[in-house]
Amino acid sequence: MDLSNLKPAVGSTKTRKRIGRGSGSGLGGTSTRGHKGAKSRSGYSKKVGFEGGQMPLQRRVPKFGFKNINRVEYKAINIDTLQALATAKGLDKIGIDTLIEAGFVSTNQLVKILGKGAISSKLEVTAHAFSKSAEAAITAAGGTVVKL
């Protein structure tokens, strides 16, 4: 055996269909495109979403509502979560960096403190926004609220 008699395994290679190379090849004439119609012509390309002349989905389904481009998305955290965090770690100040460290928020999220639950310890809470009930509960417990 040497390089001159190497061959691929039997049946492992196939010859490419050579379309449109004369009637003698068996693939001449219409060149596998059928007769007439847009798909048989050169330069044909279907538009995105084209459904053969049927009214396409994006035109059948009506538009509704709107996206407010000025919407500010907050990550909501309740005061009972803050209380649990403060008791677990023995904290008297809770800020954004504390919440990131604890895994409640990611670095680019804005935080809003909500008033679900109860708070018993005196905490200094720093966040981007507070609900009225949360602010009232924190100040009632002797804590302070710092808005960023």
Image (spheres, helix red, strand yellow):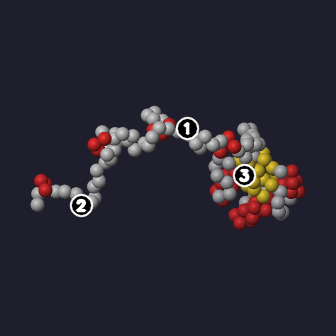
Q: Left or right? Give the position of 143 relative to 57.
A: right
Query: Could you say where residue 75 lies in the image, as x and y percent from the top left?
Result: 72, 52
Q: Callout 1, which amino acid? A: Lys
Say which label, 3 or 1, has the lower sequence index.
1
Is disc 2 placed on a helix, strand or loop? loop
Disc 3 to disc 1, C-alpha distance: 42 Å
Specify whether residue 96 is in view.
yes
N-term-proximal mark, 1 vs 2: 2
Q: Which residue is label 2 attached to?
A: 10
In front here: 55 or 24?
A: 24
Disc 1/disc 2 C-alpha distance (Å): 43 Å
Q: Quadrant of the C terminus?
A: top right
> How many neighbours does mark 3 have within 10 angstroms: few (below 14), some (14-19), or many (20 or more)?
some
Q: Quadrant of residue 85?
A: bottom right
Is disc 1 surrounded by few (<14), some (14 to 19) or many (20+) residues within 10 Å? Answer: few
Residue tagged 3: 75
Helix, strand or loop for disc 1: loop
Q: Nearer the viewer, residue 11 or 26?
A: 26
What type is the residue that disc 2 sits on?
Answer: Val
Query: As displayed, is residue 116 above or below residue 57?
Result: below
- Residue 107 or 126: which is nearer the viewer? 107
